[in-house]
Amino acid sequence: MRFHVYFAAVAASVAVSSPAVAQQAFPSDDAQATARGVVLQQHSLLNQTNLDFGIVTTDGISAGTVTIASTAAGARASTGGVTLLPSTSSSARFDGLAAPLETVVLTLTPPVGNVLQDAAGDQVTVNAMSVDAAGLTRTANASGNFTVYVGGDFGLTANQPAGVYSADFNLNAEYQ
């Protein structure tokens, strides 16, 4: 029996200490890569201020115009028989959000039929509408912000009926 215990002890020590029985080591390499992606912020274009030519009157003799500049100040001017009365007026202001330094292409669409209309159906002609000096193609700033001002030129008849005239227009932003 002594022989069996000795033989078992020898077999156990050979199994533990023998490199032939240990797990073989294979050559290996490590490499590193970067996982990345780009997340864009949500694009938006919001109207902050409406285009408003204020309160005006006509002289009953001559047609004329009232113009709002497409600037932050939205300066107001008139021609012909149109007289500007004390009131608030403003250019339209749109604030946009794009990706930082992204190109934005704008399209300005005047009111349907190029007219403003009052409740009675009387009309004021939209002679022209324009965006600010930055133009219809611009680049968002490093934060992705941009602002657009819209002005217009409106034609009134000599005997323009009294009323509150309005119509919707559209400014579209395409982000590229």
Image (cartoon, helix red, strand yellow):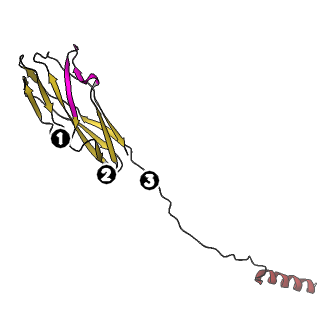
Residue type at tag 1: Ala
Residue underneath mark 3: 38
Label at residue 37: none
Observer-nearest residue: 24 or 108? 108
Alpha carbon of mark 2 to alpha carbon of mark 3: how far?
Answer: 15 Å
Alpha carbon of mark 1 to alpha carbon of mark 2: how far?
Answer: 20 Å
Q: Position of residue 113 (x, y in %)?
A: 27, 22
Precedes in sequence: disc 1 or disc 2: 1
Alpha carbon of mark 3 to alpha carbon of mark 1: how far?
Answer: 34 Å
Mark 3 surroundings within 10 Å by alpha-carbon count, few (fewer than 14), some (14 through 19), many (20 or more): few
Q: Helix, strand, or loop for circle 2?
A: loop
Q: Position of residue 13 (x, y in %)?
A: 80, 83
Q: Helix, strand, or loop for circle 3?
A: loop
Instruction: Write down the region rendered in magenta.
Output: 112-129
Q: Position of residue 160 (x, y in %)?
A: 13, 17
Q: Position of residue 15 (x, y in %)?
A: 80, 80
Residues marked 3 and 1 touching at CB (< 8 Å): no
Precedes in sequence: disc 2 or disc 3: 3
Residues marked 1 and 2 touching at CB (< 8 Å): no
Observer-nearest residue: 15 or 124? 124
* Residue at the (44%, 53%) spot, across then down: 38
| In magenta segment, residue 126 | yes
**47 displayed left or right of 10:** left
**141 displayed left or right of 133:** right
Label at residue 143: 2
**147 displayed left or right of 90:** right
Precedes in sequence: disc 3 or disc 1: 3
Residue underneath mark 1: 72
* Residue at the (14%, 39%) spot, across then down: 73
Can residue 130 be seen here? yes
6 up-or-down from 126: above or below: below
Residue type at tag 2: Ser
